[in-house]
Amino acid sequence: MIHNEPIAIVVAALFLPFLSQVLAVSFGVWSSVVAGAVQFAVFPVWFGRSLVIGMPSGEVIWSRLLRFSINLLTICISGALAYATLHATP
């Protein structure tokens, strides 16, 4: 265990001033992943609403389909890069 270890205490004391920056970066990365997932989930809701209420113009439909495709592709590429970087298999 690491009880009363001077090296651990010094390392923790050196790390402490940077704790807020590390937390900010980690929460920023976490929230961007959630933001990507939210954008991914918005399209089916919009599509269902459009089927019930009525479809908008073709320009709106194509822009939403393009946005959905870009979000899906970005999430897939990001996941593949993360696995490749960590040398992990899905």
Image (cartoon, rainbow, N blue to C red):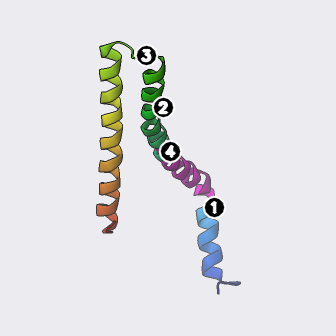
Q: Is residue 53 left or right of residue 82?
A: right
Q: Which secondary structure, mark 1?
A: helix
Quadrant of the rendered structure where residue 82 is? bottom left
Q: Which secondary structure, mark 4?
A: helix
- Which residues are drawn in magenta? 17-32
Q: Give the amino acid at mark 4.
A: Val
Distance of mark 3 from mark 1, alpha carbons? 56 Å
Q: Which residue is mark 1?
A: 16
Distance of mark 1 from mark 4, alpha carbons? 27 Å
Does residue 29 show up magenta in the picture? Answer: yes
Q: Earlier in the sequence, mark 3 or mark 4?
A: 4
Residue 40 x %, y %:
42, 39
Q: Give the amino acid at mark 3.
A: Gly
With respect to residue 69, does 10 lie above or below?
below
- Depth-wise, is mark 1 or mark 2 nearer the camera? 2
Q: Is residue 20 left or right of residue 31?
A: right
Q: Give the amino acid at mark 2.
A: Val
Q: Which residue is mark 4?
A: 34
With respect to residue 55, does 90 lie above or below?
below
Q: Which residue is at the front of the view, 3 or 27?
A: 27
- Depth-wise, is mark 3 or mark 2 nearer the camera? 3
With respect to residue 89, does 47 lie above or below?
above
Residue 57 x %, y %:
34, 12
Residue 34 x %, y %:
50, 45
Density class for disc 4 (Cα within 10 Å; few <14, some 14-19, many ≥20) is few
Q: Earlier in the sequence, mark 3 or mark 1?
A: 1
Q: Earlier in the sequence, mark 1 or mark 2?
A: 1
Q: Which residue is at the front of the view, 34 or 43?
A: 43
Q: Which label number is shown at residue 54?
A: 3
